[in-house]
Amino acid sequence: ACTANCRPYGDITNYSPVTDDDTRWQPMIEDNGLGFFYHYDHVVPHIGQTAALKLLTRTELNTRVSPDPEYDYDAESQLVIQRLNETAKDDERKMLVEFFDAKKQVTARIIGKIESILNWDWQ
């Protein structure tokens, strides 16, 4: 674990994915079909294990349990297949997926729009 000079909002747990267990989370690797491969990075900070809590104690936070959502995984997987099929036939949907997948550009556009609404001065 990192103890000094750590990167802000970086992983202090030294997490490494378990690659020989398909039931565990795996980083998703994609490509553009032209030989460029990339993987997803987290784009938001996590409170971590050492942050000071304001509303709950660490014990209260660690013992919270959510109710079972009782998902119907077969029905949900069929919905995913249906939506992918619909998206494959719809150029606008494909364009929107591509646009919103570029998280840095989307964030810059959102900030730019807020800037124009609030008339921010960057000086």
Image (cartoon, rainbow, N blue to C red):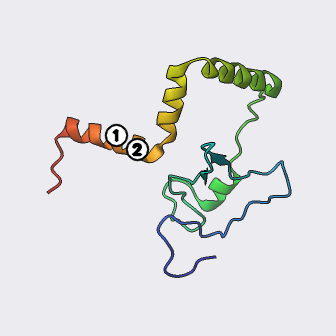
Q: Residues within 10 Å of mark 1 (few under 14, many from 20)?
A: few
Q: Secondary structure at mark 1?
A: helix
Q: Quadrant of residue 59?
A: bottom right
Residue 104 x/y as whole percent:
43, 47
Q: CA distance from mark 2 to mark 1?
A: 6 Å
- Quadrant that contains the N terminus: bottom right
**Residue at coordinates 35% horizontally, 45% vertically from top-left?**
108
Q: 96 and 21: which one is in front?
A: 96
Residue 85 vertical placement versus 19 (above, below): above
> From this viewpoint, which residue is outermost toward the bottom?
4
Quadrant housing the C terminus: bottom left
> Residue 77 lies in what quarter of the image?
top right
For residue 3, side relative to residue 116 (left or right): right
**In the rendering, which numbered label is found on residue 105?**
2
Type of amino acid under label 1? Arg
Report the residue at 58% width, 62% height from top.
48
Q: Nearer the viewer, residue 11 or 68?
A: 11
In the image, residue 77 sits, relative to residue 16, either above or below, namely above
Q: Is residue 25 above or below residue 52?
A: above
Relative image position of residue 80 (x, y in whole percent): 71, 25
User: Residue 109, which numbered label?
Assistant: 1
Where is residue 110? Give x, y as percent: 35, 39
64 or 87, nearer to the observer: 87
Q: Nearer the viewer, residue 65 or 115?
A: 115
Residue 67 visible, this angle: yes
**What residue is rendered at 60% in x and 70% in y?**
12
Residue occupying the point 28% across, 41% down? 112
Residue 46, position as x, y percentages in the image = 55, 57
The answer to whether the residue labelled 2 contacts the one labelled 1, judged by CB atoms less than 8 Å apart, is yes
